[in-house]
Amino acid sequence: MKRFLIIGVIAAAFNTHANACVAEYSDHNYYMFSVFNRDQTSPAYLYDIASYWQKYVDKTSSTYLSSSTDLSFYRWNQKYIQKVAQRKKDAEMISYLRRLNDYLDTCEKLNPNVWNYASKQERLQAQQSLTRLNNVTKLYKGTKLKSQYALLRMRTNMMKGFHQQNITYWNAIASRLPKSPWREAMRNIYARALWKTGKHQQALDIYAEQGDMASIRVLARNYRNLAGIQSIYLKNPNSAMLTYLVQDFVNNCQQTIDSRSKEQLDKEWIEEIGAKVIYQKEALNFITFANKVIAEGKTQSPCLWRSATAMLHYLYGYQQEAWKEISEAVALDGTQRMKDNARAIRLLVSTRNTQVDSDYPQYLVGEFKWLNEMAKEENPRKDSSTNPDNHYVEVKERVAYRALYNRFKTMADKAKKENRQEAGRDYESMATAMYGMMDAYMRTFYKEQQNEEYISRYLYSSEYALRLDSLSAQQLADYYRFITAQHQDAFQQYVCQSLYRNADFFKDMIGTKYLAEGNFGEAARWQKDVSLDFINNQAISFYAEKRSYSVPYWFNHQKVNDSDMWSIQGSYAHLKENPKLKFCKEMNQLISQYNVAREGEVREKLAYELATRYYQASCYGDCWYLTHYGKSVADSARTGEADFAAIAQKYLKVSKQSSNLTLRYHSLYALSSIGIDPWFKITYDANWNEQKLLQPQSAQYQAMMEWSQFSRQHPEIVDQYTTRCDVLKQFEKNL
């Protein structure tokens, strides 16, 4: 399913090491319809075979095995397994492994997906190899590996296209072998032979019984539309293929809707991910057909069909119909997975139900707890090196991030319009809390519980932090008060109890928000209680310890080697005081002094000092850590925040009027260095040659002009910053 890249300032910046520029997040729009575990599409016997090899080599005692486990275990550990057999002096196994590896090598050569296609001669040699191996299997007279050799025989027949031989061999010999994963593997090959010889239903029954949805998916590739579903239903109303096809159809409808952008359908993306375009007309016709299926009473799984109509009605905006149908679906017959699917969809549909009763908060609590338990059971067997996709985790994500978030935002807007401001703030906080709840859940679901130090660092790179950073200081303060308060509402209580509520984290973030808004008094009030241990454990403290906001940015770039951060163990710095608190106190003092100062040099020097600090604390300065948690080359003044760079310009325009020529020079140089309103822009001619287009009305152009005139009039004042400045020379050349 579709996952989007979210590229943003905070996403870039809130990184453990603070200097990244891109973060990747899901859009949480996962497929909701799941009537079989899509991550367990491989039949159980494959896992049992992998387990057999792991036990044979005594995996736990070896340090030489590939980290890859489960289905790929034998593939990545062939040589080691051979060595174990040799060490055990297991002659039978050594001989079998030699044949098995020959078979696998031959299959690899015939694989149509390999980069280099086999030549005609290589294909002939491969066929000859399969024939030799087939003959060898017939000569085995032992008992220990009888099933393995029988499987190898059916495998070679399959590769040679001898499907009728496999049917005969299964019925006469293989089916009578002792129950084992090897026999189940042979039965799977037998099912393939049945399909190849036209006995489709028998094949499907075996695949369904084995849980081999991957095979069913391949067989169903020509039936992935309403017409295909209808044709299968007419042949067998309870065909195993319908389980896959109905799920596939509903999810394809969802994908088609999700892939629309400004009324344009991204067909290329849909095809790329293996989905199929299903338009609304066909979807509504499916609903009509599904109603007919349920009415006829031939299906053993009416829950499947009714859940499908409910989900489709939900997707296309028919919420009353969706709620009525999904309420019916949960009580209908079907597999347990189908009933669980209906329950999950009911939760999603409920978020758009406007007629919920007073028990709805408690209902949400119960359903989220149920999803937690289902997620624990869902975890499929996959390579240990990867985190598996988990359907019930994805249900939680979609319901929390998209459905409930939107519900609470809508309720907040409604409350504010009705002048219920407190209720509006609470609903707004609950919308944000959906991110916090899922952040806390995901940290603990796929990982062991992390310590406080790890959490404090992790949170800055999270999607939750991106949401928190979108809030104003007041909104963030309201949110903190909300999540730390006592609640009567059952769901509010459930959510808030799950959240990370570290006082240092929130006080620092709220204080930082107020600082970025230019409210130094409120910023200081929140920052004063933040512990130094917390501050030193933040990645930004690495920069705070090495840079000073009192140093003029335009004369001294305070470079720091970011790569040094990666080797740091423990705290990033050893600051003795909170740099944000110190900055706020100094700024309040300087602003007060400036406001009462008389016209003249003292006031002008104060203006220059304020300009220095404002610019350093802006997103362009070296001390961006005062107002933000990260820096990107694409940064600019953010909505809702004070434009510190523009404020710096305002003060520099005061200090540049000074009769003190050195102060005047420094101010002009500083104004010329601030490029938020640049003196030129790049354009291209018809031949794509780069050209500079001058911007005489821009602030930087006017500053550059004054600087140029001053440097000519007062050469005794200017220093190497001017005499060696290539930018000034370019400017003067373009005059």
Image (cartoon, rainbow, N blue to C red):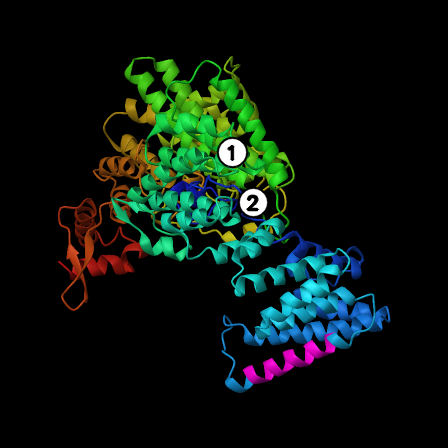
Instruction: Confirm whether residue 586 shows in the render.
Output: no
249 or 667, which is in the foreground? Answer: 249
Q: Where is residue 181 in the image (x, y as percent from the top left)?
A: 71, 57
Q: Please give the name of the residue rendered at 38% of the width and 18% of the height, measured from the top-left corner.
A: 355
- Report the side of 288 relative to 687 (left or right): right
Report the magenta stretch's main SS: helix
Q: Position of residue 68 (x, y in %)?
A: 65, 58
Q: Please give the name of the residue rendered at 21% of the width and 53% of the height, measured from the top-left corner.
A: 711
List the residue tagged with mark 2: 37
Is disc 2 placed on a helix, strand or loop? Answer: loop
- The image quarter in which residue 353 lies: top left
Depth-wise, is mark 1 or mark 2 nearer the camera?
2
* Cα distance between the residues tagged 1 and 2: 22 Å
Q: Is residue 304 above or below residue 496?
A: below
Q: Give the range drawn in magenta.
A: 123-137
430 or 264, which is in the foreground? Answer: 264
